[in-house]
Amino acid sequence: KPIELNPEDTLIMPRGLGTLGFTSSRYWRDMIEDLELNGFTTVPSVKCWDNCSSKYFTDILCKKAGLRTPKTVAISHSEDTERAVKELGTKFPIILKSSTGTQTGVGVVIIESMRSLHASVQMLKLYEKHMPILIQEFIKTDYDVRVVLLDGEILGSMKRDVISDGDF
């Protein structure tokens, strides 16, 4: 039987708000937004999900908040690689990745030359013409830190060590 939901005492935690066209559908996103428009609280909100589902947009938001991030440049098509590398302003190696989705590093590639970048972007665009991709400066490190914040307060953090010599 259907149950009656009241926006005053119902919190909705949608599962499946993944990458549109990849792990989610527009219908699912629109349905969650409809619930928000009808007064329901969703966690995450559609706005939060939209902000976080693009690594490129997340980088923009972090920079506007005064956070240091790796130099990041979006690439719109395969003939855009030289412009993007020039704008990035760093030497090879660089990082190439999809701007959407998360697979714990799956699809993140170290690129050693302009030739390999151009070929890699051509191949990605061949299989997914509108795939949002970006390049970033490569920063050698032994670890990274993930932090969960709420209203400026740290709720938790985790240090992730580089697993092996070939990891990055």
Image: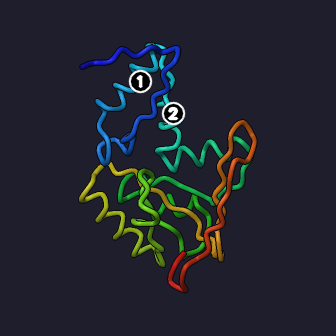
The amino acid type found where label 2 is placed reads Val
**19 relative to 161 in the view: left or right:** left
The amino acid type found where label 1 is placed reads Glu
Secondary structure beneath label 1: helix
Number of callouts: 2
> Most extreme residue toward the front, as rendered?
1
Colour approach in the figure: rainbow
Structural crowding at the residue carrying mark 1, measured as other residues with C-alpha within 10 Å and reported as few (<14), some (14–19) or many (≥20): some
Q: Position of residue 62 (x, y in %)?
A: 65, 46
**29 relative to 111 in the view: left or right:** left
Q: What is the distance, in whole Å, between disc 1 and disc 2 at their CAs?
A: 12 Å
Residue in the picture at 39% in, 40% down:
15
Mark closest to the chain's N terminus, 1 or 2 = 1
Q: Is residue 37 above or below residue 150?
A: above
158 vs 76, nearest the viewer: 158
Secondary structure beneath label 2: loop
Quadrant location of the N terminus in the rendered image: top left
Residue in the picture at 54% in, 44% down:
57
Q: Position of residue 94 (x, y in %)?
A: 53, 70
38 vs 49, nearest the viewer: 38
Q: Position of residue 67 (x, y in %)?
A: 72, 50
Structural crowding at the residue carrying mark 2, measured as other residues with C-alpha within 10 Å and reported as few (<14), some (14–19) or many (≥20): few
Residue in the picture at 48% in, 74% down:
110
Task: State the residue position of label 2.
Answer: 43
Residue 96 shows in this picture: yes
115 vs 6, nearest the viewer: 6
Q: Position of residue 71 (x, y in %)?
A: 62, 59
Which mark, by number, is residue 33? 1
Question: In front: mark 1 or mark 2?
Answer: 2
